[in-house]
Amino acid sequence: MGTNDTKSILLAGVGGQGTILASKILSEGLLRKGYDVKMSEIHGMSQRGGSVTTHVRFGTKVASPIVPEGEADVLVAFEKVEAVRWLKYLKKGGRLVVNDYEIYSLPVLTGAAKYPEHITDKLKTEVPDIKIFNAGEIAESLGNIKAQNIVLLGPLLKPWVLKIWTGNRY
């Protein structure tokens, strides 16, 4: 990787989904591959089921841990509404990984609001390079529903995502 080679991954979920743990595991793996890695976590109202994001940036020399709006190479959404909420951070031509999973907010649970319909269809029209799957079902089939955060890291190891990183380091 050259001098201006910083790559950015934004992970977005809801408190309790393991977003921060997944980012720490991803960061550790990138460190072990020899990259300079910066990570930042934003909790919001995470303890009350609110949005949680983590920014992971890596390259030869990374100046800031924060992914600027419109510059994420990859957005990993642990919940469908979070994909919509953070989509503005994904760069044109970026990759989107979406957990086909719904977490209902308090207004939705009380009937004051409706969960948005056809989210994945809308995302498919906006992002050509998208991977949508139910990480919970996969984790449960492997014996532990709590491992869906790790399952969501899987597509980051696939060549369709790794092709954004130059060289043959993977």
Image (spheres, rainbow, N blue to C red):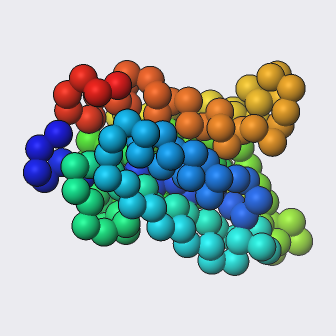
User: As displayed, is residue 168 above or below residue 55?
Assistant: above
**Rendered residue at 88%/71% (across/down):** 110
Q: For residue 109, what is the image quadrant? A: bottom right
Would residue 118 be visible to someone looking at this image? no
In-image side of 65 versus 85 (left or right): left
| Image coordinates for residue 19, horizontal then vertical, percent | 63, 54
User: As displayed, is residue 51 above or below residue 10?
Assistant: below
| Image coordinates for residue 86, horizontal then vertical, percent | 47, 61
Q: For residue 128, what is the image quadrant? A: top left
Would residue 70 be visible to someone looking at this image? yes
Q: For residue 136, what is the image quadrant? A: top right
**Rendered residue at 43%/39% (across/down):** 32
State the residue in front, 131 or 11: 11
| Image coordinates for residue 56, horizontal then vertical, percent | 42, 56
The N terminus, quarter of image? top left
In-image side of 151 versus 112 (left or right): left
State the residue in front, 134 or 23: 23
State the residue in front, 107 or 165: 165
In-image side of 140 versus 59 (left or right): right
Question: How many dots with numbers?
Answer: 0
The C terminus, quarter of image? top left
- Specify the farthest residue to the bottom: 45
State the residue in front, 84 or 5: 5
| Image coordinates for residue 65, horizontal then vertical, percent | 37, 66
User: As displayed, is residue 96 above or below residue 168?
Assistant: below
**Rendered residue at 11%/44% (across/down):** 2
